[in-house]
Amino acid sequence: MMSALVSRLGSGGGSPAPAGQAKPSAATRKRAEKWAQGLTTRDAAVATETMADVQAALLDAQAASYASCPDVVTVIEATLIAALGNLHASVREAAVVLLNVLYDGHAMQLENALTPAVSSVGEAPVVRLSLPQTDPTHPTVLPQGSVTLRLFGPVDAGRPPRWTTHAVTSTAGGGLRVRLPPFPRPGYYDWLVAHAEDGDFKPDTDRSAPPDPSVASTGAAPVPAVNGEGGSGTADNGAPVSGSADPLSNIDRRRLCGRFVVQPAGTRESLVAEVPVDQVGASWNAGTGQLETRGSFAAVLETLPELKMSGATAVYLMGALERPIDEPDAPPMAAADRGVLAKVLGGGKDFASLTSEIRRLGMVPIVDAIERVSRRRAHRKYTSLGVMTRDERGVLVSHPGTDGRVITWEESALLNYRKVETWALLISEVKRLARDYGVRGIRLDNAQSCPPIMTMDAEELFRLDPDGVPHYSLSDILYGTVVLRNEESGYWASEAGADCRYANPFLVKLTRELWNEYPTFMVLGESHFHREPQLVASGVVPHSMRVPQILASISGMSLRRDGSVAVLPPHKRSTANTLARLYRADKADLPRDAILASCTCTHASPYPGALYRRRSWIAVDLLFFLPHMPVLLWGEDAGRALRVDMAPVVEVEEDSVYDVNYDAVLPKSPRLRHSGSQPVSPSSGLASATHELSELSLGEAAMTASASNSGGLRAPPYSSSQSASVSPMDGLAGGAAPSPPAVTTNATTSGGGRGLGGVGTGMRKRSNSSLNLRSMSMGGRKPSFGNLAAAANAPPSSAGRDASAGRAAGVAAPPAASKAKSLASGVRRTSSVSTLVRSRTTDEGKRLAVRGVGASDLMAIADQEARLRAEIGPQLGFDLSQIRGHYTHRSLMRQQLPALRLGKMVVVPVDPSVKEQVFAFARFTTEQIVVVALNLKDGRDGEAFEAGVNVDLDLRPLWSALPEEFINRRADLFNAFDVVAGAEEPFVTEGLLTLEELMFRRLSLHLRPMSSSVLELRAEPNGSAEEHYAQSITRLTLEDAGDIKDPRENTVLSEIARGAATSLTAFATALDKARCGLAAEGLEASEIWRVLQLGLQRASSLLFSVLYEGTVAPKDFVPPVGERLVSFLAMLSLSAANPDTKSLARSLLANATAIGPIVLLTPELGRFSTAGGLGVMVDDLAKELAALGLEVHVITPYYTLNRKNKTGYLGDGIRWTRNIKVDLGTHVVEVGIFQGKEAGVNLLFLERGDLLPKVYADPGGAAKHLQTVVLFSMGALEACCATGLVPSVVISNDWLPSMAAGYAKNGFFGPYFDNTSFFHLVHNLGDAAYEGRVYPNPHEGDFGVIHRLPRNLLVDPWWSRVVVNPSRCAFMTSDTWGTVSPNYLKELLAGHPLKNLLAMAKSPFAYPNGIRIKEREAALAALNIKTHAQAKEMVQKKYFGFNMADHSIPLFAFVGRVTSQKGVHLILNAVDELIAHTGGKIQILVGGPANEADPYAAACARHMRDLSRRHKWCFWAAPEEFFTDGLLVDAGADFGFVPSLFEPAGLRQIESFVGAGDGTPVIAHAVGGLVDTVFEWDLESGSGNGFLFHEYNHHNFLGAVKRALRVFSKPDEFTELRRATRTTAIDVRDAAWAWSSEFHRLRNSIYVRRPIFREDLNAVVEEDSEALDPAATVHVVRWTAPGEDVVVKGSWDGWAREWPLTDGPTPIDGEGAEEVVDGSVPVEKHMVRLRLPPGDYEFKFKVDGKWGLAKDLPTRGEGAFTNNLLSVS
């Protein structure tokens, strides 16, 4: 065994640095023997100590330099590679980390993985870093030269990397910026921002012990000094001393460092031609089908000119490696010798000639690199590197090649990648091909599984012979020479790789060594299982099949991993939106500027014609237009569909586990279900879940984490949850790690001890788990209540505190434990007997070979291809034989448009109604913008798609992503030009537009069926600024006010907004320019005022849109607030130099802020009748709107019984005032009106006991149901008339008042409501019941006699039966509508049955609900809860029986109703697994009652009782009790649970965010309003408040919880998370601001807050402006008598408006300010400063609502006409 470790010491091959030839020292040999013994033990503690020793040796070697101890370095490498497949999970995790550290040459990744970005040689990237700001108005700026960036990377060929220093500059916004020089060579460049006096990175880690992830220094860790020496202002380890004001000390160290993965020059714009050598020149005898001529290297040579002309920059020679020489039909990938060229194709000589010519033509020759070898006739050098497995009879056989997941290749043999010799051999073979034959690139087959390391078969390897002696040697155990079949282990099954995003050590070693010798070497890698992020970080360009698989799915075909194809069931097919979601997810998942390769098909699959049919042309467009390196398969552009050497096509529909369903793995919110699909009512229980939720079964297999008879924990049972095992970070902060089991015989549960190398502490961007194939196999099966009911009978688990003794005992588990199927960090494993594994037999493998076939086979292929071509439709323009022209044209476009080769990409949103059909995106560089839109459907998808589609593209996301070069050109004239048509005429025909207008006005185009449009946005060659402004004026007069929401849509409005943000002069100039332009159009004065008022309102609301609606913020100005605009108007109305401007300002000022009463119609309200969130939201909103100074009225039913079944509940302040009569069509009823006022809100109640007995009571029949709606809708308007209330805005909430707008706008009240705007507010539109639908019997018609409205307002004529829908009336007659969360709005527009009606509104509004934060904080104070720790202690004592707090245990809590909507089953299903995962160090509390009458709640209650019984220290629930400690638990929990199936808005998460001094983050389902309020924690930006799971299943939920556990294990980061969480709480006042802004927009009015207006007015009055009369001077009007609210009105503006008086210092108006003792200036209570031209001005004061005169000021006039007088000379 020792010789195996040290056998390579003399050669030094494979070491990170060139090693010497010296023999290993005795000490090195002894150390190697010790490490080998420590890593082959079943004792996890010993193995952990061994890895600690390896780590210490590695750090010592780095400190001394690798060159000084090559023998030690080589042994370290061999040891760590062997450890990748170790028995113990902690060892495997540590091996990943330490191998990265080894190959890096420094220890920056010892604790956390570096965040990678991708660049290429010659590119000069910029590093930007934001500094923490204490005062945003005074950004932190560091002294020049005080900070530097240290860069570690390759500089010269053959020399080790070194550190270089680069200057850092401070930005004006308070950040750091470093422009690095162009990278000279490919490789890994690691950077670190440090103080100028600091030096190269040195880890501040104890070398004698592995770092403990539970206490890893991941917070505001300082940068260490040179060689650990302290300097001025630093501690001994180089850290700034306590109390230092150093801004870097407040930044998490992970944000101060990163990595550039630098690819060879030109990689980003490469185009690869894939040439299967066997096919080129191959021919068959038509009569016999026999192969007459095989392809060859010489035949490929003849095609090179054609490939060069096609734009290829690289040629991938697939199948060039040597195969078994006696197997003529061996498949191309059956390599007998990976370093020799195939003789059957011409051998090395012909190949050398071929590669020489490829390079002469400026292209890159690429060959296969294969991790496996032929199972028969392989070269002898592989003999000792094989790995064995047991077959079904227990006989040892060679393990076939495998991807470790779903495919095994029976014709190949797996090599043992636990051996460093195996790594070195593959690398040396590639180098030989580069050295001897000029190869300059490889395509690594099966790269997403390299190195393929299978789980060791511990049962076999630890087997004893009959004499009691171990059958296998320690060397066999160390290298795992016997493995479980197809059970993936090593890097790809590690948390370090899958979750913490450490690079793949094997691929890092491969790329480092190749780039060191061959700096132009290209490394492509086959990619599946969504492992592109790890491949990119490891230096590989992933050859991804994502786009082809999605496009095939859209076309109804399943393109599988092995190239086989089957027809896909409709419910599994993707849509255009799948592509959009994929690329949006890439923004978070992939390293920045990642380079990927894509294709339309593979060498194993059919050609595009068979995969996509008519979408073949779309496939070509995507190939050349998406931001990927195109890979073209030889022959595909010839229009062929099929060939001999391809995987089979099954033309029958099947629901297979092998189908790739991207819709099931990409982040999204679940679509709303249409009527008739799975219900979501509580009575439906789990039937509301999606058909893939197999995890909802709460039976024995899903619940139990059983223990061995020795007490040791086994892995949780296998399920489709893909759960993770106990990981190296399971020892959580603040306490000792749980004792590990002495041995585990599966891949994921092992002892744990403390993790090494900081495993598990890496920054986690996003889970990138692989496809859950088992959940996809569920088909239409739904979980049943029978599974739930079985929960009560589940056997108990011994996991928990009472199992710790057994775990510590270290007794071996029985052999059966080795067969437990477990999962690590979300990576699914497949057993050798699983039906999920496709074993490709030797005969099946030969199908992929160019070989002889029967004549009938050739005829069948020809016939099938002819049939396919005819089916596609050549007569309609879809002629496969002509598709080559399409390839050529698109290739030329890519060559001619740099944006399509080099540009970044942004997904362009389209209308929700077409998002399943249209995919749009933009590509851009600093000099070019290209927009691409594709229609992926035609008439074969349905009649609706026959005529094409009109689509509006929203380019605003593109504007936010564009570089500064384009932002600076915002005012330049731009247009879109059709690149496909080559037209020079502008595409947009509505006139001249600036670039900014083009971005903010929707770009409209028509897409023909199955077609694409490519538009380049470039400068408009014709037109002037004057012409453009005139056209902007014209557009402004023609467009409806509702059509414009953002002032940047029109230059006239944007100039007004920018002017207001700049100065009074700029504002006046823009306003006057607009006035003149409108007058030139011939508009009357009143129309000019209307248009300009629109401009002012939109300018004033831009800031609110940015803050509340996510509108793209301006980059060149800060949006002005309404108070600033009104202050400017006020000054101009007093003393504008231009009389016309003064007159205009006075007219605008008179109307700009005028908004009348706001009336809310609501079925439930606050303390009176709240039944759910609607009543709370409306009550809070009304009160806060009133607090903002608005006149608010609420009209709501006075039910006979309130929610507590009490009568007479209104209270003394609300009394009967009158009765009114309401016509219900069939008869007239009398309705009582009760009125009162509370908290500034005017309340009006309607009483009619027979129709309004109780909130949402069953009225007793369809007719009465409709009469109730008519009663409230019409009665509310009758009440307004009776009380003389003329509303400015009426807001109807949900379905009960939803017909009010219909009655107001159909003449029922004459002109009374003609000037009223109607807004319909949706709180829940989840199913038919929430629409208020009425279902008449056939003889009842449509109840027209009752509602009396036009039939089309209530009945959809296209529905199969008559349904009277009040919500339809609301959406058709209201001016606009809104809802309680932006994401819920999107869901409604995309998937609701009424989506077409919803889309009629120009600008629907949404904003999340808020809570009363101050009241919640006061309630916490009343409980004497001051800190989170204090609250947590109270919870642990009260609910878990602790005598004292244990803050090292994470506490999770759910508070709420136990219903199917709330997703409680997800929590319960995860309890056993989480307890096993954490070794019992977790607490979960479920607080809420369960209704035993509800089957779902009853089943959950039984499960809760079972869990409480088995895990009394870890789980608490009392489903039979009403939970009253929600406030305490929210404050004390470390994390909250909000796993709702659907949630339009939600308040529980926001309540959690308000804790005792900080906030409680939540784990939430990404649906509805939760998406708008819960944000994934991102350490890099320090933002977020929780962890989201996007798929509603056990696996995704568990993944989110484990991400939370990972953060909890890092105290500093957890503290930062809780602080950040508190800042995201939404106060109800914020919501009121947002809704007030929307109502003002609807009324075209500017919202003004009086206190802010007073402050602005005082500031503006002192501004010197050319727009003001130079003779005007500042004067003060004072009120010195008592009073609180004081305003003044005067002749200075024609008595137009009231001017508020505010507190302020004595003004400088000629009177001296008397200084007091402390040097301050006296403050006057009420004053206003006005800039007035000379003249006499009369004025009068209004004090607390009453008009009066100031007795100390001059007066003029007599009697009632007496006014105060101000004379200005």
Image (cartoon, helix red, strand yellow):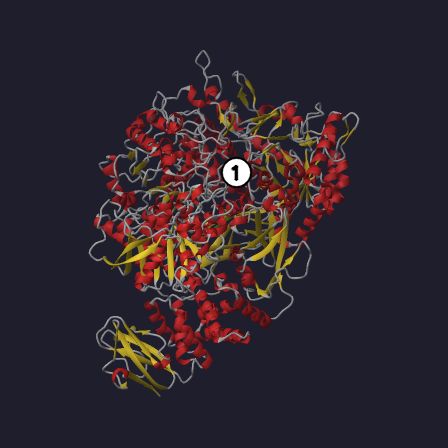
| Side (left or right) of 1651 relative to 41 | left
Percent position (x, y) of residue 1684?
24, 70
Q: Closer to the camera, 261 or 1556?
A: 1556
Percent position (x, y) of residue 19?
56, 37
Give the residue pinned by disc 1. 504
Quadrant housing the C terminus: bottom left
For residue 584, say whether it is visible: yes
The number of numbered discs placed on residues in the rendered structure image is 1
Q: Closer to the camera, 403 or 34?
A: 403
Q: Residue furthest left?
A: 1212
Crowdedness of circle 1 by 10 Å Cα count: few (<14), some, many (20+)?
Answer: many
Q: Closer to the camera, 1685 or 318?
A: 1685
Percent position (x, y) of residue 122?
60, 52
Q: Is residue 372 above or below residue 438?
A: above
| Side (left or right) of 1665 relative to 506 | left
Q: Residue furthest bottom?
A: 1769
Q: Amino acid at mark 1?
A: Asn
- Kindly state the secondary structure of the residue where label 1 is placed: loop
Which quadrant would residue 1710 be assigned to in this image? bottom left
| Side (left or right) of 193 relative to 1556 | right
Q: Closer to the camera, 1734 or 1390?
A: 1390
Residue at image coords 54%, 70%: 1033
For residue 224, say whether it is visible: no
Q: Is residue 1070 above or below residue 1373?
A: below
